[in-house]
Structures are given as C-alpha cells and as structure tokens.
Amino acid sequence: PGPHRRVDYTAAFFMQRLEWAMQDARFKLRGKRAPSPDIVIIGIDDKSLQELHQWPWPRRIHARLIRALEKTPPKALLFDVFFIDPFTADLAGDRELVHATRENPWVVHSFYCDLIADQIQNKTPSFEALAAASRQTGFVNAVIDEDGTLRRAIPRLGSDYLLSILGAGLYLGKTPEEIVQALPLDAQGHLAVNYIGAESSFAYVPYADVLSGALPASELAGKILLVGARATGTYDHYPTPLSKNMPGVEFHANVIDNLLKGDRLRDAGLVWTYAAIAVFGLFCGLVLVRLSAWAG
C-alpha cells in the first residue's frame, strides 16, 4: 500500500494498454492471411434456423449431422455447442446423439467451466450419457484481457484441454500433450493467438446444407469441422485485434489454424528487446545531430 505502489500500478497498467494497442496495430498493418483449407465451419445460421426451425434443435438433428458425415468422415467434428441437460421433449433424440457419438471417435463435444486464477472451479459438462459416450471433450473458455479483447487461449487446464487442441490433435495424429508441449506459452501458460483476419475468414457452410446434401459430405472428408452459432443474436462474440464482433467458433478456428501451420506468436524476449533499444538509440544519436531541431 502507499502512493508509490499506486503510481507503479498505474504506470504498469498504462504500459500494458499501450502494448496491447501496438500489438493490435501490427495485426492491422500485416493484413489478412490465407486460412487453412482443411478448416471448415458448419454454421448454425439464419438459413438453417429457417429450414430447421427454432433453436435449440432436438438432439436428433445433431445425430443426423454425424450420420451424414460418417461414410466419408472428417478428421474431427468439434461441437462448439453445449448439450448440458437431457432434452425431455425428445429423449429418443438424445439417445440417437449418444449412439452416433459413441460410434464415431472423431466427434468431440465441449463444456464450459468457471475459472479462478486459471483453476477450474465449476465444470458444466454434457448430460451424463453423452459425456460417457464421448472419447474426448474440450473446454471452450478463453482469456479476455482487461480492455475486453480476446488475444490469448488457454491450451490446458489440469487434465482438460481446449477444444481446439483436441481437434488439431485428431488431424495431426498427435496426443493433446504433444501438441501443448510444442507451444510457445507465456508465464501464465497462455497461447497468444495469431489471428489470420477478421470474422468470416474461414470456409463456411450452412448446417442445413450438410443435412440436406446440398453440399456433399465427401467434400468435407478429412477436414476439421467446427459446429457453431452464426445466426443473428444466437452466438457468443468477442472483440479481437482484427474484429469487434468475432463469433466464438471462429476463435477456435484461428487457434487450430495456428497449430496446423506452426504459425505461432512468440515473445521476442529481453535480449531482442534490449538489442532493439540499443540499435534504435544509436541510430537516433547518429541521425538527430545532423538534423534541425524541427526535423529532429
């Protein structure tokens, strides 16, 4: 406590905000990058809601999606959708989803948890039968910085892994542990996300088109598919360095893209930081003496 401590905290807070702003500016200057062609979002969009009616859908619809894909299966089908309680109006549909999940190990469901200091306090899994049928389940929590922007992912919490990590592991044929061990994590165990662009950067297909066969399932074979909400007013959205309104499912797509390409952000470290200060300091010292006061 005391005035000096408050001044130190204020300075550190200001410098952190400045660093975030500079990092976001560098993303904008760099521009958009090409997404991996093997990442596809199956969107719960306005068109799909019109054709399949009001959300949430009976679980039999999600079972139909899995069955539509299983003859020419993807590497992974990641549901960024929660199935927390049994759907009492259609328990038969719940059983269909459980069976389809059990029979296809490339299906990965998700859960949400409450965090305190990156420790799981309360876990909200899928309903019991679905959780038991799932080979893997991943959490979907992310790190929101103090300015409200989503810049970092949490790859692992104890023995649980981020949904994106599990999807990349299925595609690459690696365990989640192998994926995480190779990541450049910060001191908190977080991964800086190297966003490729604003929202709608990845290949996208309406959920209803996959069910109806308008898009042949064979065109999705061998890919990583993410199921998530895109309809107006139905999805969780976050500000990112390149977007003010990115759907949560696209956050996971960006993390997977980084993992597949090995295109990750790394902290340069103090050696490079001090080297840059020295070089620019010498440059300014040599140049400014040759300029007028106004030009300098």
Image (cartoon, grey):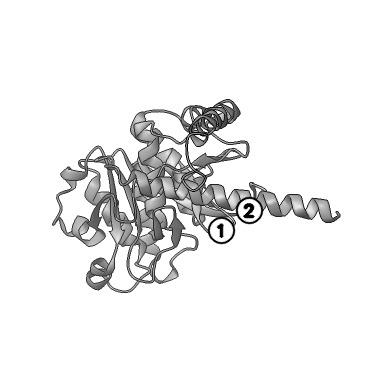
Q: Is residue 204 something one can see in this rendering?
A: yes
Depth order, front residue of 67/73: 73
Residue on which the image places disc 2: 14
Quadrant in which residue 33 is drawn: top left
Which residue occupies the foreground of this view, 38 or 78? 38
For label 1, the residue is: 147
Q: Position of residue 132 (x, y in %)?
A: 49, 47
Callout 2: SS: helix
Q: Is residue 88 above or below residue 9?
A: below
- Residue 192 x, y percent position in the rendering: 49, 41
Q: Is residue 116 visible?
A: no
Can you say whether 230 is above or below 121 in the image? below
* Quadrant of residue 208 within the rendered picture: bottom left
Instruction: From the viewer's perspective, tell me whether residue 293 is left or right of residue 97.
Output: right
Which amino acid type is shown beneath numbered disc 2? Phe
User: Is 163 above or below relative to 123?
Assistant: above
Q: Secondary structure at mark 1?
A: loop
How packed mark 2 is, by other alpha carbons closer than 10 Å (few <14, some 14-19, many 20 or more), is: few
Foreground pick, 164 / 68: 164
